[in-house]
Amino acid sequence: MRNSTALVTIGTLSMAMWAATPTLAHCGKCGHGSASKDIVDTAIAAGQFETLVTAVKAAGLVETLKSDGPFAVFAPTDEAFAKLPKGTIKALLADPDRLGAILKYHVVPGRVMAADVVKLSSAKTVLGQSLIIKSSGGVMIGNANVVKTDIETSNGVIHVIDTVLIPANDLIETARTAGSFKTLLAALEAADLTGALRGDGPFTVFAPTDEAFAKLPKGTVESLLNDIPKLQSILTYHVVAGNVMASDVVKLSEAKTLQGQVVRIDASSGVKINAARVVKADVAADNGVIHVIDEVLLPPSSKQSNAAPPAQELIQLAINRGASLFNDGHHAACTAIYEVAAMGLLASSDGAVGTETRDTLRNALASVKRSHNASQSAWVMRHALDEAYESASREMNQ
């Protein structure tokens, strides 16, 4: 079960790059040094983040950034916002969801000081997407230069940047922009799968519309929101690894989902995924593709079907795909694949893995949420999946 090829290790950024970056001197206005003010009040007092503060208020994130945190905020100055194309700020202020996504892309959980950042090649944001950290010619977060560091606050730290960071148009943002997947997005959030579908992927999502969810018997959606393992199982049954375009789908008779079971594909008259019709295909996202379907897919229960592959097959599938991504340098994508596999195992009720292994998987998922190191996160999840594989083997042989 171990990778047969050596995995790439992350290089450490040079401390000298940060030493050359100017820091904000202590002053009464900004509160730096005393750390008596929270992130929002510190930004207000500094006087150079008026647009950012306005955006935070419009997106309803003031309470979040005033909470205990801690958070590290990569804060664009007013000049950074002024570099956006004309009309962009006005449009964003009228779209709180999109604005909120952009702002969350500037926030990393934890009090991540400059000395911590230099040890990273990427950092997972509150949005769920990762920021790339570069050290060539000065320190950059994404495409933004870090111009001041370590402005301490009572609930975190601010690093000042000169460019507004725009998150990738991932599967979640693509679905949000479409406007017809509100129930699906709410379900993904409740099932803690939003972050996974913001990962590098790529993923193919057979996405039920709000009307598709409305076809379910009354009370079904509410019931699923109170049964997270079952909800996770159903949602991962709608996701296939890879960028499977319509031209690929029509050549298949089935596809293995991240939930572990297969969906049937019938292209004899239009395209059907199980009993659901594909009503719109090839909705492209930066990390995959969406095919819109008119019904919610429900995986066969273990009692009704013997077709479900064993847990080992799901784990092996995830590791084969994840290891390849890792070795190509896509550490965050590898982690996302492993996370989805772990959630699928936890959602299973067939006893394929033991109680201790379930605890290991839960602990690994929690650890990844707190981590800022994509490579380390991938290894944490990999070790947990290896243990799950061994546990499933023992269970099967008993």
Image (spheres, grey):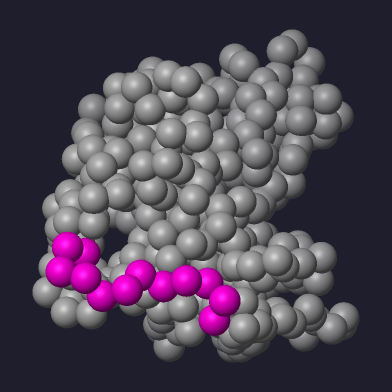
What range is drawn magenta here?
19-30
The residue positioned 45% from the left and 43% from the top of the image is: 80
Answer above or below: position of 148 versus 104.
below
Q: Where residue 111 sits: x, y (%)?
A: 34, 76
Residue nearest the observer in this picture, 303 or 142: 142
Residue 81 left/right relative to 169: left
Asked if residue 25 lies in the magenta stretch, the reply is yes
The residue positioned 49% from the left and 31% from the top of the image is: 84
Residue 189 left/right relative to 145: left
Could you say which quadrant of the image residue 341 lies in?
bottom right
| Residue 25 in view (yes/no) | yes
Could you say which quadrant of the image residue 249 lies in?
top right
Q: Where residue 154 sits: x, y (%)?
A: 18, 74
| Residue 100 in view (yes/no) | no
Residue nearest the observer in this picture, 71 or 153: 153
Residue 358 left/right relative to 2: left
Q: Where residue 12 sits: x, y (%)?
A: 66, 83
The residue positioned 70% from the left and 79% from the top of the image is: 10
Q: Where residue 199 sits: x, y (%)?
A: 58, 54
Residue nearest the observer in this picture, 360 or 175: 175
Look at the image and tell me in which quarter the N terminus lies.
bottom right
Asked if residue 149 lies in the magenta stretch, the reply is no
The residue positioned 79% from the left and 80% from the top of the image is: 7
Residue nearest the observer in this picture, 322 or 357: 322
Answer above or below: position of 390 versus 224.
below
Look at the image and tell me in which quarter the C terminus lies.
bottom right
Extreme residue in the top direction: 269
Answer above or below: position of 208 versus 144.
above
